[in-house]
Amino acid sequence: MIQPAEIARLAHRLGLGDKTIEKDYVLTWTLLALANSPLRGHLAFKGGTALKKVYVPEYRFSEDLDFTLLAEISNDELVGAVESIFPWLRREANITLAVRRVEVHHTGNPAIYLNYTGPLGGDLTSRFFKTDFTRDEALLFPLVEASLQAPYSDCRSRNQTLHAYSPEEILAEKLCALLGRTEPRDLFDVHYILEHNLADARAVSFQIDAKMMHNKVNRAELGSVLARKQETLRRLWEPRLQGQMPDLPHLDTVIRETNRWLRQAGLVADSAS
């Protein structure tokens, strides 16, 4: 385990809170543990955390882990498999994890909440993160065998890989999420992927209909969804994202640029506003 001073130095350099860095450290080691476990072959790492831990190390910090299940495994078996990494984490990094609770969505997909104790110490029940698992996803693009970015001094030399979503798959899933819920991080992720050309957006445009049908969302609404949700996004933008990055872009700029890039990629009609 790294010392609190390493956490403090990084937090100071980035202008973020110590607990944000500590959580990222614990998430990093949890990923390394999963990559070293029998679960490795049954998981596809996805979402904003995958962007940071696989593709863009300087990306926004995340609150949780997201996976798609690639094999049939019951919720009880999954919880047991997650618990089986706890001794390894304790031995390799002196990190303590414990199951806080398990929530099962109406679809049957589980979310496992994990308490943790990391470099900053404290009571085990005082901090936690969520690990979401999804079954029966419609995958449009091949998975990537991805090296995990482990930037901390005690794990930089760990060369572990996980199956991960491609940037195109992440973009497609985030676009579906934009239509199905109102989470500022979905818009932030879509904007970043398009701004930095991380994904082939035109390839996504050609294939995304199958994923949208699977997720029961309407592609025709992509051109108007940001205008429709703008006031809710404005209310949530800073409270939800401010602590995840040093400099949060202005929402109006993000919406304007995202709409323009969606049109350029053919994801929405040119006449959309």
Image (cartoon, helix red, strand yellow):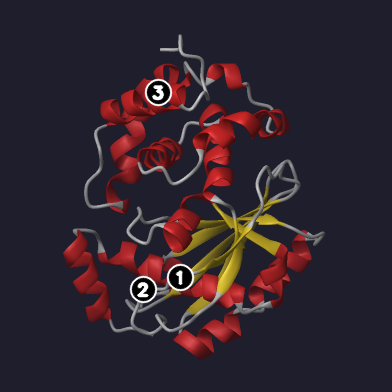
Residue receiving disc 2: 151
Q: Which mark is residue 225?
A: none
Q: Which element type, helix, strand or loop, lies under badge 3?
A: helix
Q: Earlier in the sequence, mark 3 or mark 1?
A: 1
Q: The disc labelled 2 sits on which kind of residue?
A: Pro
Q: Which element type, helix, strand or loop, lies under badge 1?
A: helix
Q: Where residue 82 appears, x then y in whole percent?
A: 65, 71
Dots 2 and 3: beta carbons under 8 Å? no
Q: Where residue 238 appears, x then y in whole percent?
A: 28, 39
Q: Where residue 28 appears, x then y in whole percent?
A: 46, 70
Q: Which mark is residue 259?
A: 3
Distance CA(mark 2)–CA(mark 3): 34 Å
In the displayed structure, 241 sits above or below 130; it is: above
Dots 1 and 2: beta carbons under 8 Å? yes
In the displayed structure, 261 sits above or below 247; it is: above
The one nearer the camera, 122 or 56, is 56
The one nearer the camera, 164 or 144, is 144
The one nearer the camera, 198 or 251, is 198
Lateral position of residue 247 relative to residue 27, left or right: left
Question: Quadrant of residue 212 in the image?
Answer: top right
Residue receiving disc 1: 28
In the displayed structure, 183 sits above or below 40; it is: above
Q: The disc labelled 1 sits on which kind of residue?
A: Thr
Q: The disc labelled 3 sits on which kind of residue?
A: Asn
Q: Residue at x 32, y 66 (%)?
A: 21
